[in-house]
Image (spheres, rainbow, N blue to C red):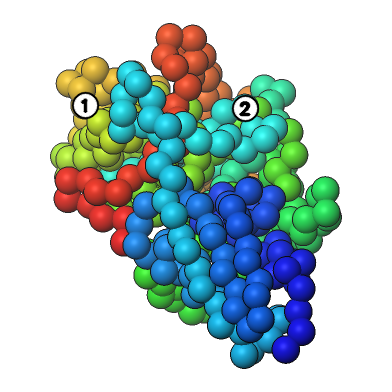
Amino acid sequence: MSFKKQDIYNVLETITAPGEGKSLIENKNITNVVAFGDEVIVDVTISNPTLQAKKKLETEITKAIKNKVDTNIDVKINVKVEKPVANKANPNLIRGKEIPNIKNIIAIASGKGGVGKSTITANTAISLTKMGFNVGVLDADVYGPSQHIMFDVEKQKPLSVNVEGRSKMKPIENYGVKLLSLGFFTNPDQAVIWRGPMASKALNQLIFDADWGELDFLLIDLPPGTGDVHLSIVQALPINGAVVVSTPQNIALADAKKGVAMFQQDSIKVPVLGIIENMAYFTPEELPDNKYYIFGKDGAKNLAEDIDTKFLGEVPLVQSIRESGDVGHPVALQKGTLLESSFNNITKEMVAQLLKRNKNLPPTEVVRITTMSGCSTK
């Protein structure tokens, strides 16, 4: 059996550090490699404290060395967890790495499905672009991605580009917005049946293995609810703020309140920039002065006041919003319309709250969650 220590390092260069988006070598996770006879000992330091992360890394390194160097090598992996330095003001918040060249990251969330969160995300992105900002959208709705449809790029596939010696995905661009979605990589006729860790790994690739370029805003379209994907996002990214979308009826508001509470957890502490009320009222085309509050009136506005959160604005229930989304032409693109004005006003309020937040609060830090009341990262 003949191999060199450099052979082992070459293999480790191909393995990604857990949750970092960089190789073990590039991220300096490897503290020592010993190669003697038919035995290899690899010492690794990681920041992810979960047993799952340690076992997964041990298996991945062992398999890679045996497959690429020699199947008869006796591989021993020593994984050490190095706890990141906590913020003294809040020991639950852990300082982490930001994505280079992305200035602001905003999560768009909803406690309940079907309230129009993806529609709000797409049109807000368009409004930001029209204001002169460089904007990207990450469709993190793992089980029901839709942004690739709303931006009329569902038949396209991201290309691979070389960035400083590394292969990365180039986001698809339309209407001036850069987009990555799991919808580009899944069969539209088949259900996505993934466990939490699988979904989290896929999202990490979209986040860290992408060449986003220079962005003023990255909007993240989260799935409904409060689950594994949400935890993965706040673990992986320094979110500057979150926006919660709801409709006016009580059952949606109850779930929206839970969504706000999730971001306000002591172990997360992502500032909620405000609440948007979608499907606020219906105005028939033949009765333009009439407003019919089909789902209730001022529900999200009252909720925002109750929980001391900014009400960012309302969007009426209009057929053209749905039609525009279905054909991949967000309604905010329609110049001089009431809907364009509605989304512009909402977007301006969101940016105003973000500026206030950036001025008055310390930067949100990447959250490392090991345990959480009622939740699990496993």
Q: Which mark is residue 321?
A: none
Q: Amino acid at mark 1?
A: Leu
Q: Nearer the viewer's eye, disc 2 or disc 1?
A: 2
Mark positioned earlier in the residue sequence (2 or 1): 2
- Give the residue at x 66% y 72%: 35
Residue 299 falls in image quadrant:
top left
User: Do the residues under discs 2 and 1 have CB atoms within 8 angstroms?
Assistant: no
Q: At x 25% / y 31%, what residue is drawn?
A: 266
Q: Which mark is residue 303?
A: 1
Q: Residue at x 57, y 28 (%)?
A: 104
Q: Residues within 10 Å of mark 1 (few under 14, many from 20)?
A: many
Position of the N terminus by quadrant: bottom right
Extreme front residue here?
37
**Residue sitting nearer the eye, 200 or 132:** 200
> Is disc 2 placed on a helix, strand or loop?
strand
Could you say where residue 200 lies in the image, as x and y percent from the top left? 45, 59
**Can see residue 342?**
no
Q: State the residue in front, 118 or 320.
A: 118
Residue 103 tag number: 2
Task: Please tell me which residue lies in front, 183 or 26.
Answer: 26
Percent x, y of residue 213: 75, 39
Mark 1, secondary structure of its residue: helix
Residue 268, how many percent across, how many down?
Answer: 33, 35
Q: Which residue is at 50% across, 52% downward?
A: 45
Three-letter residue code for mark 2: Lys
Mark 2 → mark 1, Cα distance in angstroms: 30 Å
